[in-house]
Amino acid sequence: MKRHLFAFNAGLLRPAILLLTVAVLTFIFADKVWSGSVDLAHHYALVARLMEHGHAAFAFDPSLAEMNSYPRLSHQFAAAAGRITGSPLAGMQTVAVASLVLLWAAFASLLGGLPQRMALAAALAWTALLAINHYLLHMPLHGDELIGNFFYAQLAGQALCLCGVLLAFHLEKRGAPFWLRCALLAPGAWLLTGVHLLPALVLLLTGGLALAMELLVLWRAKRGRPAAATAIAAASCLAALAAVLSHPAFRAMSEISTQNGGMVLPYLDNTKTLLCFSAAMAAVSAAQMVFWARRRHDERLMVVKYIGAYGLAVSGLCLLQAVALVLGFGSEYAMRKYAFALDTAALAALSLIPAMLVYRSECAKETRLLAVLPAFLTVVAVCAVAAPAPVFDMRKLEELERSVMGLRAQAKAAPGKFSYVIEAADGTALTEYMMSIAHLHIPRMENANAASLLFQRALVDWPAVGAILTAQGGALDHAPECRKGTPFGGMVALDGACLLKRAAGMDRIAFTQANRVFPCILQGFSAREANGTWTEGRQASLRCALAARDKAEGRVEIAASAFHGRQRAILTVQGQPPQEFVFGADTQTISLPAGASMPGEIVMQLALPDAVSPQQLGLSADNRVLGLFVQALEYK
């Protein structure tokens, strides 16, 4: 009896140590945000919306755009965690980091299932390869989905996929019925499709390959009922495929996969090399499965079969994605997203090679060392992948989130207008855009302010601004009469109409970045710079808010200079007859009649027939067609 109890506790020791390691690593790295990608904002907005609505369905939300149809299961996990912490950001970050750690823990647990001699050889290779990649190669592994990019759902799905592979391994090792393992494939694939399509397909194919190898052994051994087993396996694989194809997320992810994005891959940055690498990986994985098949009597080698099946599934799907691309489906970007799984599968496969070389059929005595080995391998992998410096300070992001959530009631906008977070203390263009779409519900599409906030950290259409949330005492908080309510968390809500009215009351409008409440709507202009704004193209127009004037004959003055040589400019103000001027390299101020009784705005059209790009002149790679550098406009 004592011996049985001791054996039971020893069996629990390894998973207990590994789970404790996962929890500790998640806690250590949960305060690090490694991504500055706009994907961070879009995933965060979906988590915030799910926290608002719970599990209830909600109508199409313009602030989410394509995220309205994105698979939501991983975001629901994050929203559930966010309800506990009171923060959608903390919820999403916890799930993201836990996925990273759990994924590597699953791989480490598989390798720890090898015989001790093989496990130690694999561990040495694993550690050496991670060090080589970290210091020399820099190839993207699992976990790099969160570094630079923010492929949150894909990483969460891959973590669940590896946990599914680990579960299948243990079920087979412990003699679970063949029909039960087949029956789990369809619900597993369906569940994962609700997280992300790519890992769902990887799980489906990995499980199918593992079952196929087992059937091959049954047929060759001519034992049991191979025909019945084959029928069960075929039915389960078809059911799993049907589950994936019928899932609502399948169509959404298929459409998203056609969008070609940018993703740089070291050493694999073109389709040909990526396909060659996939083919080589498929060959290595197939060889490892053959290694297992020839020694199938030794159940300790079952790890080799599952790691080989995973590698063959990932490389095979990448090759199939290339075929789909040739046939007009998907995109090169969709194919490149397999790189994380490909490189990680290559790491695992290469770690197995020295283990296979030291394999001995006799059973050697195993020590307690194997109990801590998976935890050690997890620590090595996570520390290697998560080593880059974080892009954002999680503490400051949470402070910004609390302030915005506390002030959003004061920032409620009138119909047709929207409120924005801008010029927050310690804020950036991305974090302010992120908070604006998540908590102030600004529409992402057909909203010039959303794009300018993200790319320029400025608002270009102030008449459409309901309110802003900004730093208390900051550059925008200079008019006490424009405040809405009391400050909170170092931020304050300001009325957009009040700020615009103050700006429109100025006779001179500077076209510089420093003019934060810019009362003009520009078309055919580039982004504002430190000293002025370039016209972009041969046609431009501006519409500037202006306090109503009643003068006998108003005039508009514009200070500008030409980009190159002499620049003709045909200007029309307030519908007056057009006038032609010639600008040179030096700044000059020209004056035009604007008529009497200004109706609250100045409208001007510019025709610039001599505009030219620096690229055309051989000066730089800048392809903007530049005409005038406008510095200021003044009404007299």
Image (cartoon, rainbow, N blue to C red):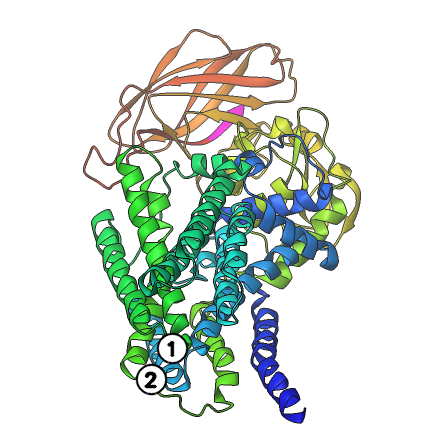
Q: Which of 332 and 459 is in front in this view?
A: 332
Quadrant of the rendered image containing residue 447: top right
Residue 495: image location, x then y, percent: 72, 35
313 left or right of 161?
A: left
- Any mark on residue 298, and which? 1
Q: Is the magenta stretch mostly helix, strand or loop?
A: strand
Q: What is the span of residues highlighted in magenta in the rendered image?
A: 632-636
Image quarter of the N terminus: bottom right
Q: Which residue appears at 52% of the width and 35% of the height?
A: 66
The answer to whether residue 331 shows anywhere in this view is: yes
Residue 516: image location, x then y, percent: 57, 39
Q: Name the residue under label 2.
A: 361
Amino acid type for the residue under numbered disc 2: Ser
Sequence order check, earlier mark of 1 and 2: 1
Q: Nearer the viewer, residue 602 or 291?
A: 291
Q: Is mark 2 on a helix, strand or loop?
A: loop
- Any mark on residue 585, and which? none
Q: Which of 634 and 235 is in front in this view?
A: 235
User: Is residue 635 shown in magenta?
Assistant: yes
Residue 343: image location, x then y, percent: 34, 62
Amino acid type for the residue under numbered disc 1: Asp
User: Is residue 424 shown in magenta?
Assistant: no
